[in-house]
Image (spheres, helix red, strand yellow):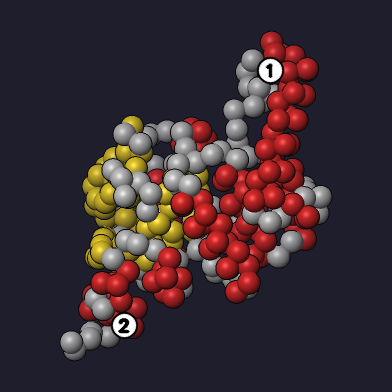
Amino acid sequence: MGEPILRLLDVSRAFGDFLAVDGVSLDIRSGSITGLIGPNGAGKSTLFNVVAGDLMPSAGRVVFDGKDISSLAPERRFAAGLGRTFQIPRPFKRMSVLENVMLAPLDQSGEGLLAPVFGRARIRQEESTIRKRALEVLDFVTLRPLADQPAGKISGGQMKLLELARVLMGDPKLILLDEPAAGVNPALTEVLIGKIEELNRSGKTFLIIEHDMDFVMRHCDPVIALAEGRVVFEGSAEEAQSNPVLLEAYLGAPVDA
Ligand SMILES: Nc1ncnc2c1ncn2[C@@H]1O[C@H](COP(=O)(O)OP(=O)(O)OP(=O)(O)O)[C@@H](O)[C@H]1O
């Protein structure tokens, strides 16, 4: 396990007077599959949004791969190697699965300011490179047979795989997954877990929000727990299982040890 790839330094995020994330400092170790748990409303998704750039922190710093990214836009963070999926996938429903993957926000000259300079041949060339890469990624996540289907027609679990495919287009170092197992049938959850572990073995780091404790215990180490916007636990999955603070947070009652 390596150095921290992501560091949060006293990060807070307020909505009006309410602190959804309240002075969080933590390190995510390079090469880990870190689980982020906590009861509803604990601030997990807000924290993801702050890390991915969809929300700016009200205070504190986000350091990724040694660089302060606190004020970068999400696309810049994606380009720097930080990918995220959403709790509720948001594909372009009428576009095909393949088109959705091809639309991952890469540095495409077709969309850039210099597009007129590069000319059509260059753009066509790039499009064919992107298509090839998108098909490879779809192959990897087992969705290639559905490449031409409208994204609105695929199942919830397949949408989670599609989100992973979009993220993989950026060849990220760190992947944030927001409830990958929620609403996904067990067979597809197994496929997803297999892919996560394969990617992890090839060096990618994961930070995963998940309510399914069985998933967390089996696949995440370490585990970080948030409650009311603060870190209340950091440790191994094994320690998490017997931690009185966590049992209280989840079962709603103090535990007499
Ligand atoms: N845009 C917003 N405006 C106001 N309050 C918000 C906003 N987003 C989140 N909150 C509040 O911040 C708190 C933390 O929400 P958040 O979604 O981060 O929690 P969570 O741990 O991800 O919960 P869940 O497990 O239910 O997804 C909640 O009380 C929520 O109502």
Q: Is residue 115 rendered to the left or right of residue 237?
A: right
In-front residue for pair 190/66: 190
Q: Is residue 69 rendered to the left or right of residue 244?
A: right
Question: Which element carries disc 2, helix, strand or loop?
Answer: loop
Q: Position of residue 206 (x, y in %)?
A: 43, 53
Q: Position of residue 44 (x, y in %)?
A: 39, 59
Question: Which element carries disc 1, helix, strand or loop?
Answer: helix
- Residue located beneath label 1 in the image: 115
Q: Which amino acid, mark 1?
A: Ala
Q: Is residue 203 above or below residue 238?
A: above
Contact check, label 2 and label 1, Cβ < 8 Å: no
Q: Residues within 10 Å of mark 1 (few under 14, many from 20)?
A: some
Q: Residues within 10 Å of mark 2 (few under 14, many from 20)?
A: few
Q: Which amino acid, mark 2?
A: Gly
How far apart in space, not on screen, are marks 2 and 1 (Cα)? 57 Å
Q: Position of residue 116 (x, y in %)?
A: 71, 13
- Residue located beneath label 2 in the image: 252
For image coordinates 43% across by 65% down, the residue present is 219
Q: Quadrant of residue 220?
A: bottom left
In-front residue for pair 177/20: 177
In the picture, which quadrant includes the C terminus?
bottom left
Look at the image and tell me whether residue 155 can be seen: yes
Q: Residue furthest bottom?
A: 256
In-front residue for pair 204/149: 204
